[in-house]
Image: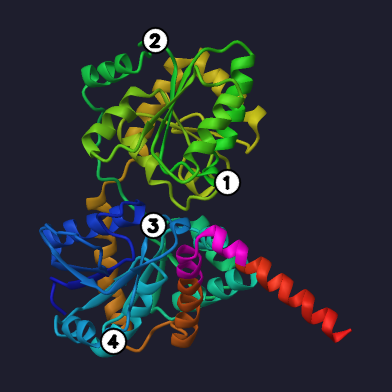
């Protein structure tokens, strides 16, 4: 086997859509193509996109799906011409980072190339599915389909032990290997003057305790816990500022709740910050990163904060808290506003100790993408050898009909309700009701 592998990386999200998994794929492709071998990213098409990367990006046909799923586009994974073109590239290994369209396409590509298929399980997709599909029957079908898609891969990686156990709770019965994600920040704080200028721009005194959250503004990331705890800390006479860096579907509700709880004078909502160097300044300006999320499987933001010398407050036992030592590299607490408030009050009155925790986090928690991807690349070789010797754990159950049924149902519902104005819907419902009433009278 050649030392330099030709790797196919597949994911449903990729710029201009930015999320943690898209960021992971970019870093995999950058490290592999610049230091280890060659990498090609395969992802759904996006209108008007221009790909300018030091690695190949292949786009395939896609369509818009519900805004409730963060505005992602669903790829059509059965394009014969695109699959034929990809199969001619001579991939040694296929690595999917999403259990939806990407893995369906990866499974077809595996049959054409006879290259092993690895999947990394990044997020608790069942939460997003149940959020997007309020009908329990549809949600259960979708989850069953995705678990089957994962089980059909030759090896399964998760970004944490907690992520693996979540996958098991959904019905997955195979083995999984923990392969941690890295951080694309350099280890070290941003310029101190830049951090001071940022504080000044938001009217935050240099000595004022500043707590920070970075990520999508969604309730299930523990943001209500943060606000309820801050309210209690304020009522106990503590002065501080809280900075929310990011955007999301629940932002307006979150801002409204901050106002209702009397925190308008303490909370700052900056919106999303996409420039990575600028984001380093935001982290560095903070004293403690608040991330009481029980949803996230790995919490790259925790390691981003650590890279900038900022420790995190986390829920004990959560995936994001894996590898964190309470009181040394972070602060662990219960998922309870009163318990979190006590930790916040401690931070307000022991800021030097909080800064020491940040120093320890920088030295002991940080992991670079270069280190992370090199570990994964080494594992690629083992997977290829096992695959060639016939050792694979995959359970084949190609559910193409199930995939199309789910996509058709979701797409038809979206298009139907987008194309019919509300007043027309209401008038049709009234008409149907009247016609049904007349029929009942005639039957009598």
Question: The magenta stretch spans which residues?
Answer: 413-427
Say if 158 sits above or below 388 in the image: above
- Tag 3 residue: 71
**Residue 388 numbered tag:** 4
Earlier-in-chain disc, 3 versus 1: 3
Specify the label residue 207 is tagged with. 2
Number of the front mark, 4 or 3:
3
Q: Is residue 366 visible?
A: yes
Q: Are marks 3 and 2 in contact (CB under 8 Å)?
A: no
Q: Residue at x 50, y 43 (%)?
A: 250
Tell which tag, 2 or 1, sits nearer the viewer.
2
The answer for how far apart the CA atoms under marks 4 and 2 are is 61 Å
**SS for tag 3?**
loop
Viewer-closest of 142 and 256: 256
Q: Is residue 396 something one can see in this rendering?
A: no
Give the label, 3 or 1, closer to the camera.
3
Q: Residue at x 45, y 72 (%)?
A: 411
Q: Quadrant of residue 165?
A: bottom right
Q: Residue furthest right?
A: 444
């Amino acid at each position: 086997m050649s030392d330099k592998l030709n790797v196919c990386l597949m994911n449903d999200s990729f710029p201009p859509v930015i999320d943690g998994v898209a960021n992971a794929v970019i870093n995999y492709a950058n490290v592999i193509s610049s230091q280890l071998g060659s990498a090609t990213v395969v992802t759904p098409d996006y209108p008007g996109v221009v790909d300018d990367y030091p690695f190949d990006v292949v786009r395939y046909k896609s369509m818009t799906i519900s805004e409730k799923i963060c505005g992602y586009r669903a790829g059509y994974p059965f394009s014969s011409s695109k699959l034929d073109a990809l199969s001619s590239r001579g991939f040694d290994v296929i690595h999917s980072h999403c259990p939806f369209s990407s893995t369906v396409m990866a499974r077809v590509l595996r049959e054409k190339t006879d290259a092993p298929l690895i999947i990394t399980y990044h997020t608790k997709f069942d939460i997003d599915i149940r959020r997007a599909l309020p009908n329990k029957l549809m949600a259960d079908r979708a989850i069953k389909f995705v678990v089957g898609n994962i089980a059909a891969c030759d090896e399964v990686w998760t970004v944490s032990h907690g992520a693996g156990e979540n996958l098991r709770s959904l019905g997955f019965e195979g083995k999984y290997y923990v392969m941690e994600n890295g951080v694309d920040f350099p280890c070290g704080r941003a310029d101190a003057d830049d951090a001071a200028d940022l504080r000044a721009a938001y009217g935050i005194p240099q000595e004022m305790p500043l707590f920070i959250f970075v990520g999508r503004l969604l309730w299930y990331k523990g943001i209500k816990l943060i606000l309820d705890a801050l309210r209690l800390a304020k009522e106990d006479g503590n002065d501080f500022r809280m900075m929310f860096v990011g955007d999301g579907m629940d932002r307006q509700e979150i801002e409204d709740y901050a106002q209702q709880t009397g925190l308008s004078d303490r909370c700052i909502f900056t919106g999303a910050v996409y420039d990575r160097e600028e984001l380093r300044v935001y982290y560095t300006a903070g004293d403690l990163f608040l991330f009481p999320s029980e949803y996230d499987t790995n919490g790259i933001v925790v390691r981003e904060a650590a890279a900038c010398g900022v420790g995190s407050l986390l829920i004990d036992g959560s995936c994001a808290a894996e590898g964190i030592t309470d009181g040394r590299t972070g602060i662990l607490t219960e998922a309870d506003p009163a318990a979190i408030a006590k930790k916040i009050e401690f931070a307000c009155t022991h800021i030097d100790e909080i800064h020491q925790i940040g120093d320890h986090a920088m030295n002991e928690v940080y992991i670079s993408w270069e280190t992370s991807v090199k570990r994964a690349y080494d594992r690629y070789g083992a997977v290829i050898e096992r695959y060639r010797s016939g050792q694979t754990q995959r359970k084949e159950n190609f559910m193409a009909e199930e995939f199309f049924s789910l996509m058709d149902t979701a797409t038809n519902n979206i298009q139907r309700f987008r194309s019919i104005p509300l007043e027309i819907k209401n008038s049709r419902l009234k008409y149907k009701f009247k016609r049904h009433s007349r029929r009942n009278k005639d039957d009598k």
